[in-house]
Amino acid sequence: MSSVTFDRIAIIGLGLIGSSIGHAIKRGQLAGHIAGYARTEDTRKTALEIGFVDSVHDTAAEAVEGADLTLVCVPVGICGQVTQELSPSLKPGSIITDVGSVKQAVITAMSPHVPQGVHFIPGHPIAGTEHSGPQSGFATLFDGRWCILTPVAGTDEQALQKLTGFWQACGSMVDTMAPDHHDQVLAITSHLPQLIAYNIVGTVTELEEDTQSEVTKFSASGFRDFTRLAASDPIMWRDICIANRDAILEMLGRFTEDLTSLQRSIRRGDADKLQELFTSTRDMRRKIVEAGQDTPEADFGRHASDDSAKD
Amino acid sequence: MSSVTFDRIAIIGLGLIGSSIGHAIKRGQLAGHIAGYARTEDTRKTALEIGFVDSVHDTAAEAVEGADLTLVCVPVGICGQVTQELSPSLKPGSIITDVGSVKQAVITAMSPHVPQGVHFIPGHPIAGTEHSGPQSGFATLFDGRWCILTPVAGTDEQALQKLTGFWQACGSMVDTMAPDHHDQVLAITSHLPQLIAYNIVGTVTELEEDTQSEVTKFSASGFRDFTRLAASDPIMWRDICIANRDAILEMLGRFTEDLTSLQRSIRRGDADKLQELFTSTRDMRRKIVEAGQDTPEADFGRHASDDSAKD
């Protein structure tokens, strides 16, 4: 599967993404040694037991010692601080990248701490589940999923190719994009849906206790699908909201305008307008299925897990 | 599987729900004869070809002739009109029920047309997919799903038991509820999520063409899940919005208030408040999984269809 190998790879942060990268590296035999770092001893111990890293270290600086590739897999809000900590140990000529869901803020936070001669290439694998922690990772998480790299001006072409090859060997399709454009696109495709899901579940948790139990009972009628999204890692999403504030507020503004208009149509009983909106949205679904981003099979809400995505 | 049999059942409306009921009746051998009616000749022909009805008829009145159970499976907005049409042919002592997602408005529309001596028991099977039409039905749609009956005052106990047994034989779990309470609960669990999904997909379809293609490309990051809901039958949802207006507007109002507050927290960079909301929503997910309404397995967005739900 792979033609790209790094002698030593460091994974900083061993949650869902960090652990999945470890598993993917093992699967593809992409590194001679994987060094891991996590903030808590518990996580480091678990990681070593599961075996998606070969060694764990008490500090991020120790973990990156001698690494040819450093992957920063911590929440967006502490990327800068963590990079500052490990920066003195970065090997000249090595590559450092991240996996954050926001790119401009991460570049601003990390760049100042990356020494000359080290290649910083920001990245974002678009993959995840609603689970978190070192136990939640698996080797196939990135298979067939996009990974967006947002190289900054003057990026070394060879380093970019090497990182591209690495993600492809992890199973990803790789695309490059300007950081600000990335942040706008993800505000729509990911951040807005996530916030809407959090918000609707939040609205329900404010209802009286007895209504809540009925909501649970009959949740299969639509609500349930939002709770899955709303079970995602709170720290990660808190940081994304703050880091991509402007693009998110822009999209939330558009969404709210449209919702107000929909509310008005319902209040007025404007059947034609309602039907028009509800018909136009079908087209978007068709495009997504055609683009191979989803299957046309009906969703019964509860489904067998995808065996091909687990091994 | 079944101990309940009707000599003759009429299914009025042969879309996703009507056709699935036909398949479920066949599977359980619950009727001696299934008579079907649909507005268009095309649908009637298709239904007969697929074979989930034994006969089709040019009018609803003809179809219900001699039926012991009549199932009205048309959009909520035309329930009243259809019942008026078929009313003269309803057999004394027979049961008539519906499958509408709103109950108060349906009762108001249908009741005046149900003759004395015929048992009208409103119902709502909480099951569906994003597909519509006579080809979209399948026998297992109702398996393990709730069906809510909302009997009105003075309902015949024996008729209620018979209808309950029918839905159980179709695979459902049956619950009874007051009509107005049903409408409130469904406004939260079903109608609000559906409208939110329509709205977010609508917002995206208003974006520039080139952004849209990127949204499609990267839709797996969250947006995709909303498009599935937003591909549901527009007529059905138009009618639900109008029929359950008050309960829907109440829930939309709460949702909008909460969204405004979330927007404010993002604008102010209020990390604590964001984290608090994003943490509280995890609990609701746990309750739903515990209630057996969803599986805890991670969702990779694209999954194998549930083999147990298709035969």
Image (cartoon, coloured by chain):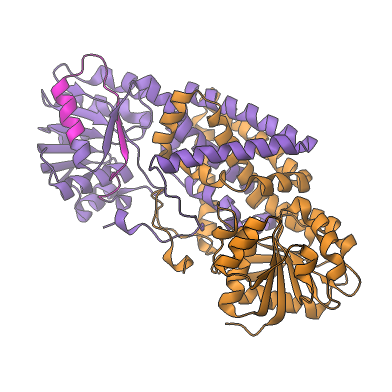
Chain colours: A orange, B purple
Asked whether residue B273 is in view, the answer is yes
Q: Which residues are magenta?
A: B139-165
Residue B299 belongs to magenta span: no
> Is residue A289 found left or right of A121 in the rendered image?
left
Q: Position of residue A16 (x, y in %)?
A: 60, 58
Judge from the rendering whether residue A139 lies leftward or rightward of residue A95; answer left or right: left
Q: Quadrant of residue B120?
A: top left
Q: Which residue reaches farthest top?
A: B154
Task: Out of B307 and A261, give the one closest to the viewer.
Answer: B307
Q: Using residue B181 as the reference point, say whether residue B40 is left or right of it.
A: left
**In this rendering, is residue B123 above or below A161?**
above
Q: Nearer the viewer, residue A101 or A311?
A: A311
Residue reaching furthest to the bottom: A3
Q: Position of residue B242 (x, y in %)?
A: 46, 27
Q: Is residue B253 above or below residue B15?
A: above
Where, quadrant-wise, is the N terminus of chain A in this rendering? bottom right
Return the x and y of residue A80 as percentages of the image width and height. 82, 56
Residue shown at 29% from the left, 44% from the top: B142
Q: Residue B52 in the image: state x and y as whole percent.
A: 20, 49
In this picture, is B17 found above or below A292?
above
Residue B162 magenta: yes
